Image (cartoon, helix red, strand yellow):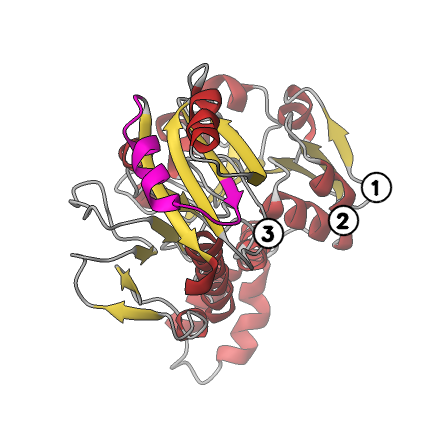
Amino acid sequence: MYKVHCMNNISRVGTDKLGGNYELVSELDGADAILVRSANLHEVEFPSSLLAIARAGAGVNNIPLDTCAQKGIVVFNTPGANANAVKELVIAGMLLSCRDIVGGINWVSENSDDPDVGKKAEKAKKQFAGRELAGKTLGVIGLGAIGSAVANSGRQLGMKVLGYDPYLSINAAWSLDRNIQHVTDINEIWANADFITIHVPAMDSTKGMISREAIEKMKHGVVVLNYARDVLVDEQAMAAALDSGKVAHYMTDFANPQSCNMKNAIVTPHLGASTSEAEDNCAVMAVSELRDYIENGNIKNSVNFGAVDLGVLTTGFRIALFHKNVQGMIGKITNILSEADLNIENMANKSRGEYAYTLIDVASGNVDEVAKRVAALNNVVRVRVINAQDA
């Protein structure tokens, strides 16, 4: 029986798919897996039993990835599971920025006790006049699951769409509307877009990507939308640009003392994935990733180890090995199997940075003893034997 500890409330739609070989436990001690959303795990002491952590969402800033890699703990996320929810909030952000819906709602609320509110509204509405999205240019930075969905919706709203992503995948390219213009120079986004939305992960290379220099290159009156990560925008530069009118509106999902007090900023309380559908989708995907790893050793959508898939384990044994990504490791491992007369029926290996992951299928033999010998090798981090009979 595998033990799963939930660090946050995880949708029952997902946890119900764990199956009879799993139980949800209230304590972390002895747990084989963690399901988490927003809980901060950086100060958590992980038990030696822990095999994997699955984040029901895309961002993993709340998880110590390096520490997990050093211990052979696989960290999964759920890319794309909340894409539609975030896309819809981005579209809402564009509409809120170009039509003064918030101002209009506030005016009605303030005048709700006036018996002539209807007549007065006809005069007052002039101050809330806006502009339409159709015919405007939308610049999308990052064409992953969310960015692609936003770009396609922009086209459906009648916008001209420019997309920038130097790492555009084939799958993402196939999903894009053929009328979306893929640009290879981000300066084309800065110079031509009426609306700019960013959808890239928070990395050293992307932090502060919307900088003072980038803003200076933008059109006067541009709308900037950030529903990805707060650190992607230089908020001091954004505040100055809003004060001067260079940026007409800043739409963001990340509340902090600075963003909440910016002129012409509309800040929402991190609502991007806050829909019941997105929570269900993320939970189902996270559970599926955990089960495939625990039962078959397969890794998909990990953020600290490479993707390895040998399919479903139906017979025999599968040896799962985490080791340093150094020369000669595979040879040392296979030599031990050969010396024990274990025939390798299938094998896969993938490195990622400092570490590598190897899966080996064998039909029979003294697998546990071989696993102990492999675990004793220098640079081996963790070894696990999966028995098809336990599935």
Give the structural element (helix, strand or loop) at label 1.
loop
Image quadrant where one finds the C terminus: bottom left
Q: Which residue is disc 3 drawn over?
A: 311
In the image, what residue type sits under mark 2? Arg
User: Label 3 to label 2, Cα distance in Å?
Assistant: 39 Å
Mark 2 touching mark 1, by CB under 8 A? yes
* Badge 1: residue crowd in 10 Å (few <14, some 14–19, many ≥20): few
Query: What residue did someone put label 2 on?
Result: 155
Which corner quadrant holds the N terminus? bottom left
Which of disc 2 and disc 3 is earlier in sequence? 2
Q: Is residue 110 above or below residue 102?
A: below
Q: Mark 1 or mark 3: name the one nearer the start of the chain.
A: 1
**Magenta-drawn stretch contains 319:** no
State the residue lying farthest toward the right: 178
Q: Is residue 213 above or below residue 34?
A: above
Amino acid type at circle 3 is: Gly
